[in-house]
Each structure stands twice: as structure tokens, then as C-alpha cells.
Image (cartoon, rainbow, N blue to C red):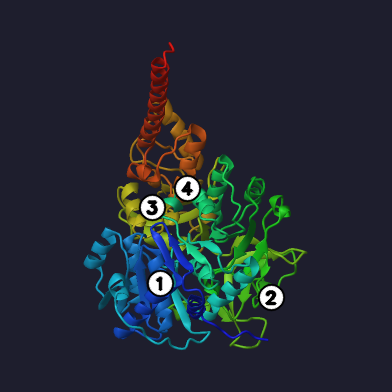
């Protein structure tokens, strides 16, 4: 018997009618009930409709508050509009790129950082800008329109190989398919608390927010500081009694670090779903060895083009000692095949490109028919042009047990910290940077320490005197931090093959360059902090105590790891905000020493109080 299609927003509104007082959104500054969230969503729908927005209209949503994004998406869906959530905390150049691709008639604006508000005023002109606060105050409701399963549901973005991001148009049935599977797998229902850790700009936000909101549970949203501090996030997960959480393995690794150092139990946590990166067996082993933890892990796989994820593997004890953790088997309604270069299936045990066949994949790339045809192709195993499959560009092989093992890419795409990066895109932006004639970008494996598995290195042919700081600043305004090369190596020329292409196999091991000499440590504390930096930075760059952490290859997840190490090695609990004000070894050492002095002063004060008490009691010290 086939279950009738119920769109995501309709499932939410049914729950709101059944349990209006149940907490829907839980934030640090308050709780929003299902009835209150439904009212906000209805006001958004009415406000959009009053401005002539309706079925098929793409509506960019720009807000730094996930709760506002949720209400805006529910309202847009109610009238058949297509929400396009953007990341208001990303570099504004990225926001601009996406707005230029969409070319919208309207932007729905929520709470914005001050600098984003100013830059939007100065640098982008749109016919209509709608304030979320203003629209929620609008009176009136609007009748919902009928939504078909294959109607466009959202627009999200992935990297493009030409430097222009590609929009992916998802369909409503793709969302419901994944949520139905996850609800059945995890048992999510009334009262289930699910963490919201993902940026609204990624399709993974759909599972974080709408798994609970279509199940009668609560979407629980941490503060920005809690998301960025591993120890604080671990404490928050325990305190909020989170039952289901989703994250990338690199973030999960920082939580495991924190859990190994603390006595924090997680009795409520039942499921951790991991996706976006390779899950390593040693990380599984460390998690399974933690006392007070019983949550099961699920390893997920699937590109955004096929809507969130499409393969899964329920992690067990064997995965702690395997050579690699499988990406598993297809979800119901999904088929996969491994093809060789001739487009024919490969035998079990042999590598092939992973191809996905499912009616729940996206509708393709927004306004990019050529790119869509390259990846969404007729099924080579059937003589039916309407039978379309998606070529992932990922290599895999099937085990004798029938599970798939991920083997890497067939092209020049990599993932770092869950972000999909087109190396060609990064190279294209290098060519536009000041002082750069041409560049080649490669992913290199790291060696030892607490570093990531890979880092990016750029080989640059300058057209005049090269200033790495200027180049990095140019790139940082246009790329996510995970896509910024950690090492920039000037070269006289790039090696070429006989056909004139860049010979990447002939590129030497990268060597970091500096604009000036590295300032050596001058105190024992700076020496210790330098050692911790070298453990977490992606490559053994020659670091000085005045260097900026983010200019020598650091990014936000590495900050979490660094601060955790400081706590572990020195007992110093440096606040994230204090580090970000001056992210140098020099400043960090000062913070550590200040905390140590404060601890000594506190001990002296306690001793003085004790002596005073003894004297007043007639007891000689």
C-alpha cells in the first residue's frame, strides 16, 4: 500500500493542530511552541502573498537566526514559493555570488550582522526587501496551495568549477523521503530533541530542523559560542538532553576529544548521524571506548544533488578495526550501481564510479542545463531517456557482504570539514587575485599530530611581487574558510604535460613562504603554545608567535581543537571570543598566563581567608 504524499510543511501544521503547546524550537533566549511557530509561518505566507509572491517564486532568506529561517521556509512552502536560505555569517562576497545567480525579485531579511546590513545596502540592489520582523507583525492568514511531490522545494548551493556557485533545486518528495526513513530508523517522535548544528545554507539543515518538527519533537538550537567550543557543545548536548544529532566527522572528532577529557555522560543521546566526510575507524574506536556513552553511530553518504543522503551504514564494533568504515547500502527507494569508464557495471570487489538512481533526487542545477546534463544522465543500463541517474564522481567498491566502501573522487573535488570544494574553482579565483598570473591547487595528506587528513596547497606563478597576505584576503572574501589553501608556494612556472596541461604529478611537496622572518618564542608559555599550534595546523609551516592563526592554515574547527588541547595540556580555559580578538601565539600565551595568575591570586585569597578564620578563632597560624 502506497502512503499518500504529505509535504513537510503540511506535516508540521498537522502536528501544530494536534499538540499546539508542545515546544517546537528551543533556543537560549526562549521556547517557541508549535502554535506560535505556525502563527509566524502563516504571517510569512500572508506577507509574501500580499507582495505578489506565489508558486514557483524563489525567495532568498537571509538571517543569522535558524528559528527565523524555519518560520520563513514553512511560510514560503505554504504558498508554493521556493525558499533559498543563505548564510548571513559567511563572507559577504559569497552571499553576493548567490544573489547574482538567483537574481531575485525579493529578499526576505531576518536578523543580520551589522556589517551585512551595511554591505547589502551599499552593494546589492533588489526590487523588494522584506523585513522578517515587519512581516510577522502583519495580520491575516492565507490559504495554503496544493503542493505536488515533484514541485521545487528549495534552492541550495554547491561549488562550481568556474568560480560561480551552482544552485541545486530540490523537490518536496526528496525531503519527505529522507525524513520518513530517518524517523523510522531513529524512532523520532513526540518529545524527541534534535540538535540544529548545520547552517541553513546547506540542505542538511532540512534534516536538523524538520525531523523533529514533523515528528512532534523539538528542534534545539545552540548559541554561536556553544557551536564553536567543543567542551561547551558537549555540555550543551548533555544538558539539553539531545537524543538525535547530525554532524560532520571532523566536528565529531572535537566532541570525542572533549568527552575523553571530561566526565560528561550523555544518557539521553541515542543517535549520532555522520556525513559529509570520511568516517575513520580510529574515531569509531575512541567513541565506543567512552564511558557513559551508548549512542549508536550511522555513517551516511550522498551528494546534495540526490537530496541530503542516500546510503547508510549502521556502525558496529567491527568498524573500529576495519581498514575503512563502509558507506553502506541504499535506503529504500534508492538504487546504486558501480560503473567502469565504458559505462558498464564492475564486478564485486572492483572499483567503479558510484551512480545513483532514485525518484527522490533533485531537479538539477538552477539555470544551468549544460551542467545538469553532465551529471544527470540517461541510465546507461536501460534504453529509456526518461530514466535518469546521477553520476556522483565518487569511486567505490562493493564488499562480499554487499556494502559499499568509499575510495575517493574521479575528479578534482575534495571535502574538508564537510564542505565540498572544487579545486578548479579555487584555481580560477587565484587567477583573479592581485599579483597572480596562474596557479595550481592540490590536496596533500598531512603527517602526524592532531592534524586533519588533508590540507590544500597552492602553487603560484606571480606576475609581480607577490604578497601572500593580500592574496589570502582576496580569497577569504570569496571562499569558505575550508577552501583556503594552508600553504602558498611561489614557482617560476607550472610543470606541463606534452599536451600542455598542468602536470600535477610533477608538482613538488609544498613549501610555505613568508613575507618576513618568523618571530621565535620568547617565553616558556609561547614555546608550549607554539607546539600546540604545530600539532593542529594542517602542515608543518614555520610559524611565528605574531602570525595570525587563520593566515597560516587554521579554520574554525581547528580553533575548537586548539582550545581543547590548551585545556587538556595546560588546564587553561581560554574563551573563543578572546582568542578571536587576537588569534596569535603571543596573545594566546598572554591569556594563558593571565588565567594562571588569576588562579594563583584565587588560591592566595583562599589561604588568607583561612588564616583570618584561624586567627579569629584564637588559633595561631
Residue 36, numbered circle: 1
Kindly identify which residue carries mark 2. 344
Q: Residue at x 37, y 85 (%)?
A: 142
Kindly identify which residue carries mark 3. 461
State the separation of the CA atoms marked 3 and 4.
43 Å
Task: Give the mark nearer the N terminus: 3 vs 4.
Answer: 4
Task: Give the mark nearer the N terminus: 3 vs 1.
Answer: 1
Task: Give the mark nearer the N terminus: 4 vs 2.
Answer: 4
Kindly identify which residue carries mark 4. 232
Snapshot quadrant of residue 105: bottom left
Q: Position of residue 519 (x, y in %)?
A: 36, 32
State the separation of the CA atoms marked 3 and 1.
57 Å
Element type where label 2 sits in the image: loop
Snapshot quadrant of residue 350: bottom right
Front: mark 4 or 2: 4
State the separation of the CA atoms marked 4 and 1.
29 Å
Q: Position of residue 399 (x, y in %)?
A: 74, 63
Task: Give the mark nearer the N terminus: 4 vs 1.
Answer: 1
Determine crowd level at label 2: few under 14, some 14-19, many 20+ residues with C-alpha closer than 10 A: few
Task: Give the mark nearer the N terminus: 2 vs 3.
Answer: 2
Element type where label 3 sits in the image: strand
Q: Quadrant of the C terminus?
A: top left
Front: mark 4 or 1: 1
Amino acid at each position: 500500500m502506497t502512503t499518500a504524499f504529505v509535504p513537510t510543511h503540511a506535516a508540521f501544521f498537522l502536528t501544530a493542530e494536534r499538540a499546539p503547546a508542545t515546544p517546537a524550537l528551543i533556543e537560549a533566549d526562549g521556547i517557541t511552541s508549535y502554535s506560535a511557530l505556525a502563527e509566524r509561518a502563516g504571517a510569512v505566507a500572508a506577507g509574501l502573498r500580499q507582495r505578489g509572491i506565489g508558486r514557483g517564486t524563489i525567495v532568498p532568506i537571509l538571517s543569522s537566526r535558524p528559528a527565523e529561517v524555519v518560520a520563513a521556509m514553512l511560510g514560503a512552502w505554504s504558498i508554493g514559493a521556493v525558499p533559498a536560505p543563505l548564510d548571513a555569517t559567511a563572507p559577504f562576497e559569497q552571499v553576493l555570488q548567490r544573489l547574482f545567480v538567483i537574481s531575485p525579485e525579493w529578499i526576505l531579511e531576518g536578523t543580520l550582522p551589522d556589517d551585512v546590513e551595511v554591505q547589502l545596502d551599499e552593494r546589492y540592489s533588489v526590487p523588494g526587501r522584506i523585513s522578517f520582523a515587519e512581516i510577522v507583525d502583519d495580520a491575516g492568514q492565507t490559504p495554503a496551495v496544493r503542493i505536488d511531490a515533484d514541485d521545487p522545494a528549495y534552492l541550495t548551493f554547491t561549488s562550481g568549477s568556474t568560480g560561480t556557485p551552482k544552485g541545486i533545486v530540490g523537490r518536496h518528495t526528496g525531503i519527505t523521503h529522507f525524513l520518513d526513513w530517518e524517523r523510522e530508523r531513529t524512532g523520532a517522535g513526540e518529545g524527541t530533541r534534535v540538535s540544529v548544528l548545520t547552517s541553513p545554507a546547506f540542505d542538511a539543515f532540512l534534516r536538523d530542523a524538520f525531523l523533529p518538527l514533523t515528528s512532534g519533537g523539538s528542534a534545539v538550537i545552540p548559541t554561536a559560542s556553544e557551536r564553536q567550543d567543543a567542551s561547551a557543545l558537549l555540555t550543551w548536548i548533555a544538558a539539553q538532553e539531545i537524543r538525535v544529532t547530525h554532524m560532520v566527522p571532523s566536528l565529531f572528532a572535537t566532541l570525542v576529544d572533549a568527552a575523553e577529557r571530561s566526565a560528561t555522560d550523555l544518557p539521553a543521546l541515542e543517535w549520532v548521524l555522520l556525513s559529509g566526510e570520511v568516517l575513520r575507524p580510529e574515531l569509531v574506536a575512541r567513541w565506543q571506548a567512552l564511558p557513559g556513552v551508548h549512542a549508536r553511530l550511522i555513517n551516511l553518504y550522498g551528494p546534495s544533488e540526490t537530496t541530503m543522503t542516500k546510503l547508510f551504514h549502521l556502525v558496529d564494533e567491527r568498524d573500529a578495526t576495519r581498514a575503512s568504515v563502509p558507506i553502506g547500502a541504499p535506503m529504500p527507494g534508492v538504487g546504486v550501481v558501480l560503473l567502469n569508464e565504458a559505462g558498464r557495471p564492475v564486478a564485486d570487489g572492483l572499483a567503479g564510479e558510484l551512480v545513483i538512481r532514485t525518484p527522490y533526487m533533485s531537479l538539477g542545477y538552477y539555470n544551468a542545463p549544460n551542467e545538469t546534463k553532465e551529471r544527470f544522465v540517461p541510465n546507461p543500463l536501460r534504453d529509456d531517456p526518461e530514466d535518469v541517474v546521477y553520476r556522483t564522481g565518487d569511486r567505490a567498491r562493493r564488499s562480499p557482504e554487499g556494502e559499499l566502501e568509499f575510495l575517493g573522487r574521479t575528479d578534482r573535488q575534495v571535502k574538508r570539514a564537510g564542505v565540498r570544494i572544487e579545486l578548479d574553482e579555487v584555481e580560477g579565483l587565484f587567477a583573479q587575485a592581485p599579483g597572480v598570473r596562474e596557479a595550481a591547487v592540490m590536496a596533500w595528506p598531512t603527517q602526524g599530530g592532531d592534524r586533519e587528513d588533508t590540507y590544500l596547497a597552492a602553487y603560484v606563478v606571480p606576475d609581480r611581487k607577490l604578497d601572500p597576505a593580500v592574496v589570502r584576503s582576496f580569497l577569504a572574501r570569496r571562499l569558505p574558510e575550508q577552501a583556503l589553501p594552508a600553504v602558498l608556494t611561489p614557482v617560476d612556472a607550472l610543470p606541463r604535460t606534452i599536451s600542455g596541461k598542468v602536470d600535477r604529478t610533477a608538482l613538488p611537496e609544498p613549501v610555505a613562504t613568508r613575507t618576513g622572518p618568523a618571530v621565535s618564542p620568547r617565553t616558556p608559555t609561547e614555546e608550549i603554545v607554539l607546539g600546540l599550534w604545530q600539532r593542529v595546523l594542517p602542515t608543518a609551516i614555520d610559524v611565528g608567535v605574531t602570525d595570525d592563526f587563520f593566515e597560516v592554515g587554521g579554520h574554525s574547527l581547528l580553533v575548537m581543537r586548539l582550545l581543547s588541547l590548551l585545556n587538556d595540556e595546560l588546564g587553561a580555559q581560554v574563551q573563543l571570543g578572546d582568542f578571536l580578538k587576537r588569534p596569535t601565539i603571543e596573545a594566546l600565551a598572554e591569556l594563558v598566563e593571565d588565567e594562571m595568575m588569576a588562579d594563583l591570586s584565587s588560591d592566595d585569597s583562599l589561604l588568607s581567608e583561612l588564616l583570618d578564620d584561624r586567627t579569629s578563632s584564637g588559633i595561631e597560624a
